[in-house]
Amino acid sequence: MGKRIAAIGECMVELSPAGPGLYRQGFAGDTFNTAWHLRRALPHDWTVSYVTAVGDDATSDAMLAFMDAAGIETTDVQRLTGAVPGLYMIDVDACGERHFAYWRGQSAARRMAEDATRLRAALASADVIYASGISLAILPPTGRKVVLAALAAARARGAMVVFDSNIRPRLWEDPATMAKTIVAARALATVALPTWPDEQVVDAATSAKAVLQAHLAAGAREVVVKLGADGALISEGGASLLVPCPAAIAPVDTTGAGDSFNAGYVAARLTGADPAAAVLAGHRLAGQVIQHRGALLP
């Protein structure tokens, strides 16, 4: 019998470089990117659903059509009258590192938790729920409480809650609120996928190993601390194990690297791989993504 994974967050209009003075329109966003790659990586008996809100404009129509074409279930995407999606533009430097400009203040996704009953119902039937710090950062305080409560209920009933803190300080109203909310979400995660050294701004962690231990102490059963080109640190039999990247790759565009790593890791774990093998699957997928422009593979 098939299982269901629900990713919650924001899908945005993406403008990525396509030549001097030219940009290509696409659709992307951190948890959406992971959902898109999960749909490609998981067997067909898995359902991948996206939980968000969009507007009733033509761009939102195109976004939903893109999700449908990718095989992502859109039943739990709310349509809000008069609203529009957020937008971001990517600029990439000579080393392949990306820089973003965002227009998301009026994004429909910021209102996805206003109907608390609908959001809870969208997550209630999921075997796996995938969320991130960005999923929480874009919401007002009441929306964050709704999402955290839904994640708590999901873990209590035995669902797997996968959380990537994906720390973006500019999205939060202040550092204290960011740290408090991220720590609260950590405590609800079955599988945690933090990044070092980003986590330093949450609890002044002094090492990747300290980040791993903090997540285990919070209640995560499985932790993968992403270290970029240095690989990943995982929890293995009560000890930590460094899993290096399989090969060094010169990036064209690092947009979506962490999101695709998460998808490769989670898909491998859900289909029977052990954590070390799943890390390698995550690295392989991320390695493909960073050799192309934009967050998603052609």
Image: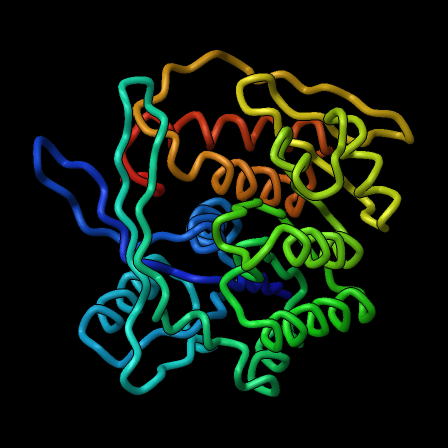
- Give the percent coordinates (x, y) of residue 248: 47, 12
Please tell me which residue is depicted at 31% across the width and 67% down the height of the picture. Answer: 85
- Give the percent coordinates (x, y) of residue 233: 71, 26
User: Which quarter of the image is occupied by the C terminus?
Assistant: top left
- Give the percent coordinates (x, y) of residue 269: 67, 42
Horizontal side of 98 relative to 133 (left or right) equals left
Residue 101 visible within the image: yes
Foreground residue, 1 or 101? 101
Using the image, determine if residue 94 lies above or below residue 124.
above
Horizontal side of 209 relative to 81 (left or right) equals right
Please tell me which residue is depicted at 32% across the width and 52% down the height of the picture. Answer: 102
Horizontal side of 163 relative to 70 (left or right) equals right
Foreground residue, 271 or 98? 98
Please tell me which residue is depicted at 69% across the width and 41% down the height of the picture. Answer: 272
Using the image, determine if residue 66 lies above or below residue 253.
below
Residue lying at the far top of the rendered structure: 248
